[in-house]
Image (spheres, helix red, strand yellow):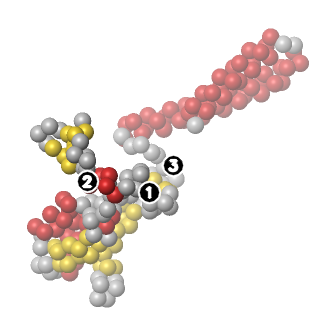
Amino acid sequence: MKELSKSKIKEYFHEISVLDKADDKYEDKCNLSRSNIKELTKKLDYYLYLEKQMDESRENEINLTDKDAKTVKFGEHQGTDVGYNVQAVVDSKNKLITTFEVSNFSADQGQLYSMSKNAKQVYEVKELEVLADKVYFDSNDIAKCDLENIITYVSKPVYSNQIDDSRYFSNKFKYNKETDTYTCPEGKTLF
């Protein structure tokens, strides 16, 4: 929007300079262009103010109607929308929500440990079994759960690539710490 406003202002300045060189019969059109420039300048100032706010808050987006809402991705092919991500733990026996958390962080990955620990506290048990889908797979979370006597059942995701050739999925590339390189499935070193 900021670039569009700047572009329109530039167009109006050009239009005014052309009309200034013409007859007085274009005076009304010049006044209209000057009015448009004032409006666009106000908008540009507002966009610069928002940009400054984003820089100061280190955010990459601002929601003008709900300050806490963020852009959230809804599934692989469902697009995005402004909203929240809700995490919930359901008791498998009674089918009741026992704990929940609302956040503006769109990824489920990294939520397994905190939600499982909350559930363990709610149930007041020493050991807990947790079932979650593959979007919750995070090796750090699983390790933390193990330390807390939380047994996790989480499917490890299959990573794909642009060419849909399973030989080149990212999990087939091996990292070598010593040389800071990767080895591809064909044995070639990638720098």
Task: Report which residue position mark 3 lands on.
Answer: 64
Q: Residue 165, located in which quarter of the rendered image?
A: bottom left
Disc with the residue nearer the chain's start (1 vs 2): 1
Circle 2 — which element? helix
**What's the residue at 44%, 62% (across, down)?**
75
**What's the residue at 13%, 69% (across, down)?**
146
Residue sitting nearer the eye, 158 or 132: 158
Q: CA distance from mark 3 to mark 2?
A: 44 Å
Task: Report which residue position mark 2 lands on.
Answer: 172
Q: Is residue 67 above or below residue 112?
A: above
Disc with the residue nearer the chain's start (3 vs 1): 3
Q: Position of residue 161 (x, y in %)?
A: 38, 52
User: Residue 72 has which mark?
Assistant: 1
In screen coordinates, is 5 left or right of 168? right
Q: Residue 35, located in which quarter of the rendered image?
A: top right
Residue sitting nearer the eye, 11 or 129: 129
Q: Alpha-carbon neighbours of circle 1 within 10 Å: few (<14), some, or many (≥20)?
A: some
**Amino acid bearing label 1:** Val
